Amino acid sequence: MTYAQYGDPSTLELTDAPTPRVGPGSVLIRVERAAVNPVDWKVMAGALEPLLDAVFPVIPGWDVAGVVEAVGPDTPEFSPGDRVAAYGRKDVVHGGTFAELVALPATSVAAIPEGVDVDSAAGLPLVGLTALRSLETLQLGAEDTLLIHAASGGVGHLAVQLAREIGARVIGTASEQNHERLRALGATPVLYGDGLVERVREIAPEGVSAVADFVGGVHEQTLQLLADGGRHVSIADHSVGESGGHVVWVRPDGARLRTLLEKVAAGTLEVEIDRVLPLAEAADAFAASRDGAARGKLLIDPTR
Ligand SMILES: NC(=O)c1ccc[n+]([C@@H]2O[C@H](COP(=O)([O-])OP(=O)(O)OC[C@H]3O[C@@H](n4cnc5c(N)ncnc54)[C@H](OP(=O)(O)O)[C@@H]3O)[C@@H](O)[C@H]2O)c1
């Protein structure tokens, strides 16, 4: 699946492309599933042009689960036939995961443990690593009360689970239809939008000690709710640095991804899947992600 210039998902087209080269320290993966993330259609719209070069035609997609087809010179970490997953962002936008084959640096790749299904492995990397990096940056501990803006999204639902595992109390914003899901994950749900500060204060009159913003546009509410000495991060609002917050940018990291996959294998972390679509329906998947029409991860199967 490729696009020849920045634009709308409707311009995605199925194309024949050469098999990617697999260089030193790299792995060629036969893709069984790719996952859709909001960044995919944002990149396609040109929103990341100031940060990342693109070489057209671009194959979109940064998340993958599949089987190692071949390894490059001096790549002892993996062998053909291994089941692997990766968050595969590269420095140049070009050869993504919406394809039959993708080549990635071994440092981005993790072996999938026994008992983890291919859908969970594909849906996990980008959002799981973002959730983990956010909580690590917050230095979240069991004594914390954490407010998560957009707790029901891809990043949010994993951050809720990781924070609860640490022992923190979690308050999460979501639309009404997702409140039951958040309760089941151990968070106290609140509606986002007007009146949010008052609703959170009813639950935590003393304020919260940490805030993770996974949506943007909520900086004011964050500052009103943070107790003295509180910490805050955002993955979507670059202005948080002005008030002592930290902007989190997820990094490819095979070792940390393996840690997350082991949690899935152990049953302590669950990746919610909305549905799996064939590669030819990638544009529909992009539109569903952009329009907020999915509950859980949207996956792409390039084998059908
Ligand atoms: N900086 C980074 O490294 C990084 C990494 C990953 C993602 N991101 C960005 O972070 C954002 C979230 O990513 P995602 O993968 O979690 O997206 P997602 O799965 O599409 O989830 C988006 C969530 O936002 C919630 N939402 C919509 N409007 C809201 C509002 N006004 N207040 C609070 N929540 C609201 C929705 O909740 P309901 O469905 O309950 O309404 C939905 O669950 C995207 O903008 C993405 O590009 C950045």
Image (cartoon, rainbow, N blue to C red):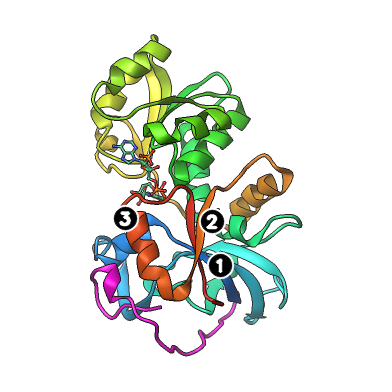
What residue type is disc 1 on?
Answer: Arg
Extreme-right residue of the structure: 114
Residue bearing the label numbered 2: 123
Please tell me in which quadrant of the rendered image residue 74 appears: bottom right
Q: Is residue 58 visible?
A: yes
Residue bearing the label numbered 1: 33
Residue bearing the label numbered 3: 290
Residue at 55 percent across and 18 percent down: it is 143
Q: Report the image quarter containing ligand 1.
A: top left
Question: Where does the magenta region start and end?
Answer: 1-24
**With respect to residue 147, does 289 lie above or below?**
below
What residue type is disc 2 on?
Answer: Gly
Callout in the foreground (3, 2): 3
The front one of 9 and 144 is 9
Verify CB contact (< 8 Å) between mark 2 and mark 1: yes
**Judging from the image, what secondary structure is the residue with disc 1 in?**
strand
Q: Residues within 10 Å of mark 3 (few under 14, many from 20)?
A: some
